[in-house]
Image: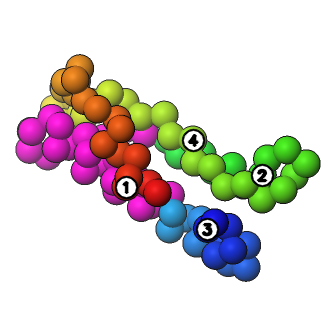
Amino acid sequence: MIMIYFLPDRGLLADLAKIAWDVLDLFYKNSINKDNTIQAAAISMQTFSYFLSFNLRLHIPVSNGCFVRSAMFYASPIHIDAALLEPLFR
């Protein structure tokens, strides 16, 4: 349970979001294989659940590809296995 680390220091939540962003950014950039790509995502943090107990979750809608500086969008291959990401977030 990671909640014991975040309860006394809520500033660590920003670090967690940054780490999640770095993992997703590298995953999608490696799937595209283009230089100077930019990933698009939004990270929303939820720290409560039923009965207002502490239950940390990250909600991350991610574009299925990357942009390049010329405003061109390159879609990720359809066969990307998101299960490969799961161990990185455990």
Tell which of 36 and 63 is nearer to you: 63
- Counting from the top left corner in percent of width and height, residue 8 is at 73, 79
Whether the residues at callouts 3 and 4 have beta carbons within 8 Å, the answer is no
Instruction: From the image, tell me which residue sits under label 2.
Output: 48
- Counting from the top left corner in percent of width and height, residue 66 is at 25, 34
Is the residue 80 above or below the residue 88 in the image?
above
CA separation, marks 3 and 4?
17 Å
First of labels 3, 4 by sequence position = 3
Instruction: From the image, tell me which residue sits under label 1.
Output: 88
State which mark lies toward you, 2 or 3.
3
Residue numbers of the magenta segment: 17-41
Which label is found at residue 59?
4
First of labels 2, 3 by sequence position = 3
Identified by mark 4, the residue type is His
Q: Secondary structure at mark 1?
A: helix
State which mark lies toward you, 3 or 4.
3
Task: Bin the neighbour count of mark 2 within 10 Å (Cα to Cα): few under 14, some 14-19, many 20 and up.
Answer: few
Identified by mark 2, the residue type is Phe
Task: Bin the neighbour count of mark 4 within 10 Å (Cα to Cα): few under 14, some 14-19, many 20 and up.
Answer: few
State which mark lies toward you, 1 or 2.
1
Identified by mark 3, the residue type is Ile
Which label is found at residue 2?
3
Residue 64 part of the magenta-drawn span: no
CA separation, marks 4 and 2?
13 Å
First of labels 1, 3 by sequence position = 3
Identified by mark 1, the residue type is Leu
